[in-house]
Image (cartoon, rainbow, N blue to C red):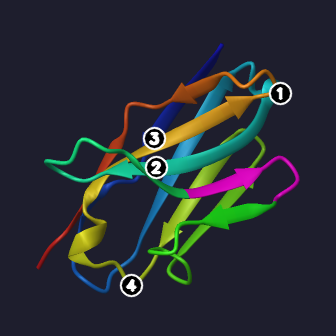
Amino acid sequence: QVQLVESGGGLVQPGGSLRLSCAASGSIFNIAAMGWYRQAPGKQRREFVATIGRGGNTNYADSVKGRFTISRDSGTVYLQMSNLNPEDTANYYCNGVDGRGMVYWGKGTLVTVSS
């Protein structure tokens, strides 16, 4: 079992920056990839943001390329977000996938971009 806990969300002005963290605990040695998804208020779909593999390979949604950076340090994954705009407002969820394909989710952290 893997537990994921996000932190770092909050209110930020347009153009500002935030760094989200996701701490994994439990059987973290089984985690093959970690990533971030987000769900905007009033929307049912959770959309992909970024992912990072065990070897450090990364992948980003087109909407965040050049503005967001995902990184990983042992059992913690970070999302550095820059040049934020109101469309980035969402609950951000940490995601982990183990070698068997089991998917784990955190409970989310809210990011609000507003002046």
Q: As displayed, is residue 3 above or below residue 72? A: above
Q: Residues within 10 Å of mark 3 (few under 14, many from 20)?
A: many
Residue closest to the far front: 45
Confirm or deny contact between disc 4 and disc 2 (CB under 8 A).
Answer: no
The answer for how far apart the CA atoms under marks 1 and 3 are is 19 Å
Confirm or deny contact between disc 4 and disc 1 (CB under 8 A).
Answer: no
Q: Residues within 10 Å of mark 1 (few under 14, many from 20)?
A: few
The answer for how far apart the CA atoms under marks 4 and 1 are is 34 Å
Give the mark nearer the N terminus: 2 vs 3: 3
Write down the region rendered in magenta: 50-56
Q: What residue lies at 27% left-to-right and 79% top-to-bottom?
A: 85
Q: Write down the residue under mark 3.
A: 6
Where's residue 70, x and y in %?
62, 63
Q: Write down the residue under mark 1.
A: 29
Name the residue type under label 2: Tyr
Q: Taking 16 as reference, is 62 left or right? A: right
Let me know if residue 111 appears in the view: no
Label 4 element class? loop
Which of the two discs, 3 and 4, sits closer to the camera? 4
For residue 83, the mark is 4
The answer for how far apart the CA atoms under marks 4 and 2 are is 18 Å
Give the mark nearer the N terminus: 1 vs 2: 1
Q: What residue lies at 78% left-to-right and 43% top-to-bottom?
A: 74
Let me know if residue 23 appears in the view: yes
